[in-house]
């Protein structure tokens, strides 16, 4: 299926992370609201029959992708390359490891650097590219110019992070809010134990997001996404959260992400499947706790937790299907759609 990109501009905070599986669920619910429950069932059946009508990525800051999940640089190689007396850290192994630890916490990779490295991706090439970007972005330091001093400045680097504006304001900020749990049967606050904390994301006024989608029918997909734009995404839509504007990115060239031949693929989505035995690669996992849309009249909003793979996983192989999970809720019609949107790359691991 062809690859497309949307630009989403938040009009307020988001109370629910805009991740691919939640977005898939919203799009199916949009079909139910626009065309009836039979239309939603038909969409789910297509996903379940391994013929998805569309596959979405999670939503990322504009011009950024998730950082590829790759194995760490082997200890011996790291010591020889980065902790040698004539190396970039002047023989200071502790400083080298501290800088590498900071790099390993980066969540995003600029699309431009992905294009540069996709046909020769490796843990050391990414680390060295990040350090080069840091040195290019940092202002010249006054005072000492010794190699160790320049290396220590890498600990302050923000390369690969979403950009700050001219006033050094962050692209987004998380905020904890107190909520009361609502009884879906009565619409009232639960009598006991109903208070909890939930995190919302507040965006800077000029923030832009990128959403990638594969589909053969972009007009049909755009109609469903437009309904979400009108109604809002995620929790607390009625209070103004989760609202955005959308536009197709006419300048996007799919070849920038797909024009690489390689034996691996990186997922831009949250993924899971009924049988993960065919999955080979490097990835991070987390426990996903899904919720049921209240438009179905379901009084129990909670799904059973399941093991999910986070965005940025790099794979040699993935299951051929089974990306629609069932049995997560007493209602057999309730599903979780976890089809992954992947892009190709070639991984060159560092020899130990």
Image: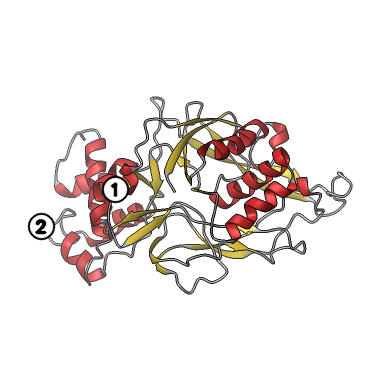
For this view, does 314 lie left or right of residue 213? left
Along the viewing direction, whichever of 218 and 330 lies nearer the viewer: 218
Which label's residue is closer to the chain start, 2 or 1? 2
Q: Which mark is residue 259?
A: 1
Q: Secondary structure at mark 1?
A: loop
> Picture coordinates of residue 237 (x, y %)?
69, 36
The quarter of the picture where the C terminus appears is bottom left
- Is residue 242 visible from the viewing direction of this image? no
For this view, does 321 lie left or right of residue 193? left
> Picture coordinates of residue 231 (x, y %)?
68, 34
> Picture coordinates of residue 140 (x, y %)?
20, 33
Along the viewing direction, whichever of 224 and 61 lies nearer the viewer: 224
For this view, does 99 lie left or right of residue 197? left
- Spatial CA distance of label 2 from label 1 is 38 Å
For this view, does 101 lie left or right of residue 284? left
> Picture coordinates of residue 211 (x, y %)?
48, 41
Q: Residue at x 16, y 66 (%)?
A: 80
Q: Which mark is residue 86?
A: 2
For the residues carrying marks 2 and 1, which lies nearer the camera in this image?
1
């Amino acid at each position: 299926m062809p690859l497309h990109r949307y630009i989403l501009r938040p009009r307020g905070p988001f109370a629910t992370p805009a991740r691919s599986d939640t977005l898939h669920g919203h799009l199916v619910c949009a079909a139910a609201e626009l065309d009836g429950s039979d239309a939603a069932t038909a969409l789910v059946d297509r996903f379940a029959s391994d013929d998805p009508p569309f596959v979405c990525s999670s939503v990322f800051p504009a011009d950024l992708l998730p950082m590829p999940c790759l194995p760490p640089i082997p200890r011996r190689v790291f010591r020889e390359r980065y902790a040698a007396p004539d190396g970039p850290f002047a023989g200071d192994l502790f400083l080298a490891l501290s800088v590498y630890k900071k790099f390993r916490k980066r969540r995003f990779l600029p699309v431009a650097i992905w294009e540069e490295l996709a046909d020769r991706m490796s843990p050391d090439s990414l680390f060295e590219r990040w350090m080069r970007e840091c040195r290019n972005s940092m202002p010249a330091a006054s005072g000492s110019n010794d190699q160790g001093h320049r290396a220590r400045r890498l600990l302050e680097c923000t390369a690969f992070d979403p950009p700050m504006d001219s006033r050094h304001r962050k692209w987004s900020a998380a905020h904890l809010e107190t909520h009361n749990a609502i009884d879906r049967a009565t619409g009232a606050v639960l009598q006991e134990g109903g208070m909890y904390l939930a995190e919302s994301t507040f965006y800077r006024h000029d923030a832009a997001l990128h959403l990638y989608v594969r589909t053969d029918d972009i007009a049909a997909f755009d109609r469903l996404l437009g309904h979400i734009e009108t109604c809002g995404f995620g929790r607390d839509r009625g209070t103004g959260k989760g609202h955005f504007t959308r536009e197709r990115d006419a300048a996007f060239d799919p070849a920038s992400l797909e024009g690489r031949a390689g034996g691996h693929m990186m997922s831009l989505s949250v993924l899971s499947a009924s049988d993960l035995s065919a999955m080979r690669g490097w990835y991070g996992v987390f426990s996903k706790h899904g919720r049921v849309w209240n438009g179905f009249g379901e009084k129990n909003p909670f799904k059973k937790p399941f093991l999910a793979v986070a965005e940025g996983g790099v794979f040699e192989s993935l299951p051929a299907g089974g990306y629609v999970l069932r049995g997560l809720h007493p209602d057999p019609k309730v599903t979780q759609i976890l089809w992954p949107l992947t892009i190709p790359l070639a991984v060159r691991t560092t020899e130990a």
